Image (cartoon, grey):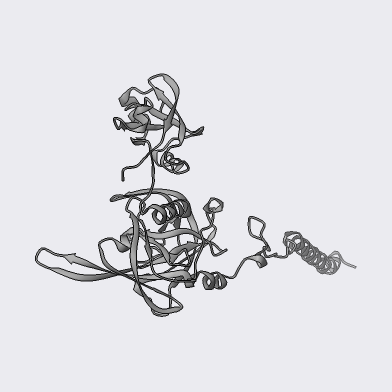
């Protein structure tokens, strides 16, 4: 057989071998590059370990709390440059006692000439009277004559965490027909601090649950149906940023207003501000963190204990403090007449001072 004939036979065989080899290699590479399938498992518990199947129905929580959410209608005198007219506004409240004590916002009833209240499952329109108001916390208590009224209860907000579910219930935009409006969201932030007008908000829950005009005074509740806050205001220039006064503050104000008609607020007799490095440098203070005493009221509780203007408070009852709002919040854990221990810096010296708390004049 000639050499050319042999080549004619061998070439197809070589090509066939190369083709089979290439297919085998491709198949092998393909098998190696394909990851094994991992089954997707759905979570069965919350981050805290609670089974998802054990979480309560939002509808059940709403059904439990809604009967205690009041529609508050207020008549007031609107004064213009030339005229005085009768105007109306509305808000919400939450019934906290079977005989008709209702917590709401001070700005809901401020300037009232008449207050009327209606409840979701009650055809009666109640005339309400003011029990007491506290502009500092923007809370007020009103009273209707009732018996065995549906009520809500305060919960402990200390267990709240960012991301927890909360429900806002209230009469948004005054839409009282058909019952209160319900919105669902999460806790977006805790311990917010604001000063708006004469109100100092220092125990505030931020939430993305929709809050609208008319929601003011209504409850913010957890998934156990407990009141963890009182819905108060929104940032109108932002989206889904609403605020509720925390239950620690709200419950104390409520109890004081019912018992005394005013709030017995513990009082140091100090004007305070946060100490910053710049401020410390300007004043020649050797430390850069703490609460600066901007003014010590002569004859006030702190001044009687020896605290002076430009002193820096670094701890209250053994707890370090770096912000005036933090100190104010801690102060609410004590009562008028209690002795509290403050650590202060004066120049380069540190000392501990015992102060007997007075009662705030406002």
Seen at 30% across and 30% down, the residue is 299
State the residue at coordinates (75%, 62%): 36
For the question of whether residue 268 can be seen, the reply is yes
Res 131 quadrant in image: bottom left
Q: Position of residue 111 (x, y in %)?
A: 25, 62
Which residue appears at 31% of the width and 60% of the height?
107
Residue 249 x %, y % = 44, 51
Q: Nearer the viewer, residue 244 or 83?
A: 83
Q: Nearer the viewer, residue 139 or 115?
A: 115
Q: Is residue 216 visible in the rendered structure shown here?
A: no
Residue occupying the far left of the picture: 82
Image position of 92 (left or right of 316): left
Residue 3 lies, in percent from the top left, at 85, 64
Residue 240, how many percent across, how many down?
Answer: 41, 62
Q: How many labels were placed on the picture?
A: 0
Q: Nearer the viewer, residue 186 or 65?
A: 65
Say which quadrant the N terminus sits in: bottom right
Q: Is residue 30 left or right of residue 158?
A: right
Q: Give the farthest residue toward the top.
A: 348
Above or below: residue 291 compared with residue 213: above
The residue lying furthest to the right in this view is: 1
Quarter of the rendering containing residue 180: bottom left
Q: Is residue 80 above or below residue 196?
A: below
């Amino acid at each position: 057989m000639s050499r050319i004939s042999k080549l004619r036979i061998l070439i197809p065989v070589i090509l066939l071998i190369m083709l089979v080899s290439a297919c085998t290699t491709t198949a092998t590479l393909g098998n190696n590059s394909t990851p094994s399938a991992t089954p997707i498992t759905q979570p069965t518990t919350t981050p805290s370990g609670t089974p998802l199947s054990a979480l309560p129905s939002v509808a059940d929580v709403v059904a439990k709390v809604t009967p205690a959410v009041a529609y508050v209608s207020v008549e007031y005198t609107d004064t213009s440059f030339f005229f005085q007219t009768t105007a109306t506004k509305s808000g919400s409240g939450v019934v906290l006692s079977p005989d008709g004590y209702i917590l709401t916002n001070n700005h809901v009833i401020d300037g009232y000439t008449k207050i009327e209240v209606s409840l979701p499952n009650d055809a009666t329109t109640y005339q309400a009277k003011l029990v007491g108001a506290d502009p500092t916390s923007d809370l007020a208590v009103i009273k209707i004559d009732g018996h065995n009224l549906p009520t809500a209860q305060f919960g402990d907000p200390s267990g709240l965490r960012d991301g927890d579910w909360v429900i806002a219930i209230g009469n948004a935009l005054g839409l009282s027909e058909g019952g209160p409006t319900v919105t669902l969201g999460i806790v977006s932030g805790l311990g917010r601090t604001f000063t708006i007008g004469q109100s100092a908000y220092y125990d505030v829950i931020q939430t993305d649950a929709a809050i609208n005009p008319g929601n003011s005074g209504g409850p913010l509740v957890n998934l156990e149906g407990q009141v963890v806050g009182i819905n108060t205001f929104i940032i109108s220039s932002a989206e889904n940023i609403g605020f509720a006064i925390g239950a620690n503050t709200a419950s104390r104000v409520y109890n004081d207003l019912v018992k005394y008609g005013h709030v017995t607020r513990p009082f140091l007799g100090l004007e305070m501000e946060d100490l910053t490095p710049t401020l410390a440098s300007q004043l020649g203070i050797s430390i850069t963190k703490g609460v600066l005493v901007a003014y010590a009221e002569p004859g006030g509780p702190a001044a009687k204990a020896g605290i002076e203007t430009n002193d820096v408070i670094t701890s209250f009852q053994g707890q370090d403090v770096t912000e005036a709002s933090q100190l104010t919040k801690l102060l609410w854990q004590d009562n008028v007449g209690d002795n509290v221990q403050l650590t202060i810096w004066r120049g380069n010296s540190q000392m501990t001072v015992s102060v007997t708390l007075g009662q705030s004049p406002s």
